[in-house]
């Protein structure tokens, strides 16, 4: 079995693929958090009661 070369941690973290995946993850998380905060207001625009919004 071949040995895997050791690469410093800072070099792995600044790899272009790692940075791209980090950006994608952060974008997805930001969208999910924004949607969870705005969703009740969007549902309220359909003239639903507070109880219906809570159950949606």
Image: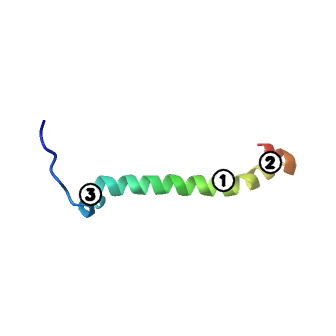
Nearer to us in this view, 39 or 11: 11
What residue lies at 28% left-to-right and 61% top-to-bottom? 14
Image x and y of residue 12, in percent: 26, 57
Image x and y of residue 40, in percent: 75, 53
What residue lies at 26% left-to-right and 64% top-to-bottom? 10
At label 3, counting other C-alpha atoms closer than 10 Å, the crowd grade (few under 14, some 14-19, many 20 or more) is few
Identify the mark at residue 5; answer none if there is no mark. Answer: none
What residue lies at 40% left-to-right and 56% top-to-bottom? 22
State the CA–CA distance, disc 1 to disc 2: 12 Å
**Label 1: which secondary element:** helix
Nearer to us in this view, 27 or 6: 6
Residue that mark 1 sits on: 36
Q: Quadrant of residue 8?
A: bottom left
Disc nearest the viewer among 1 and 3: 3
Circles 1, 3 touching at the beta carbon (< 8 Å): no
Left or right, residue 29 beside residue 48: left
What residue lies at 26% left-to-right and 60% top-to-bottom? 9
Identify the mark at residue 54; answer none if there is no mark. Answer: 2
Residue that mark 3 sits on: 12
Circles 2, 3 touching at the beta carbon (< 8 Å): no
């Amino acid at each position: 079995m071949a040995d895997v070369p050791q690469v410093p941690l800072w070099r792995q973290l600044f790899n272009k693929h790692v940075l791209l995946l980090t950006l994608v993850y952060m974008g997805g998380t930001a969208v999910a958090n924004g949607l969870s905060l705005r969703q009740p207001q969007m549902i309220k625009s359909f003239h639903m009661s507070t109880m219906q919004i809570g159950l949606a």
